[in-house]
Image (cartoon, helix red, strand yellow):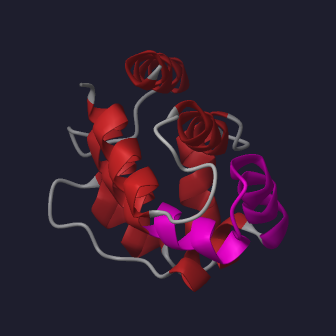
Amino acid sequence: MGLFDSLAGQVLGSMSGAGAGGDHSSLVDAIGGLLGNQPGGLSGLVSAFEQQGLGGVIGSWIGTGQNQSITAEQLQSVLGSEQVQAIAQKLGFSPDAVSGHLAQLLPQVIDRLTPDGAVPAPDALGGLLDMFKGAAS
């Protein structure tokens, strides 16, 4: 079982309601879309966090130290209501549920994507996301 498959399984297992099942592909696609389609990729996401005064939080996920936590509300302020709503609609859950689960999952994913404490080049990030998608399907 791949790393992302395991993380996705933990999040999906904790989500209640119809549609959670064992299908990881929709969660993988949502996270991949979040990181892969973000203007500027992961660097763009870092900028979005910094603009909301949360640069230290995402910096802790990228760095080699302990990850700081983030609330669902903070994450929603960074991502924006439209993006959270789109992910929620795709997964069939409420925006609040998606924000909460992304707040748990995103720090772990970014931490794993940045094992050396630095943001990978955009082409390397795409390859890692493709690897995660392959492991979860």
For the N terminus, the quadrant is: top left
The answer to which of 99 and 110 lies nearer the viewer is 99
Q: Is residue 40 visible?
A: yes
Residue 101 shown left or right of residue 92 in the figure? left
Residue at 64% across / 45% down in the picture? 34
Residue 109 shown left or right of residue 40 in the figure? left
Q: Position of residue 97 (x, y in %)?
A: 59, 72
The answer to which of 41 and 26 lies nearer the viewer is 26
Magenta residue check for 34: no
Residue at 43% across / 77% down in the picture? 70
Q: Quadrant of residue 25?
A: top right
Magenta span of residues:
81-103
Q: Position of residue 19 (x, y in %)?
A: 63, 49
Q: Is residue 114 visible?
A: no
Magenta residue check for 97: yes
Numbered-mark total = 0
Asked if 76 appears above or below 90 in the picture, the reply is: below
Residue at 52% across / 73% down in the picture? 100
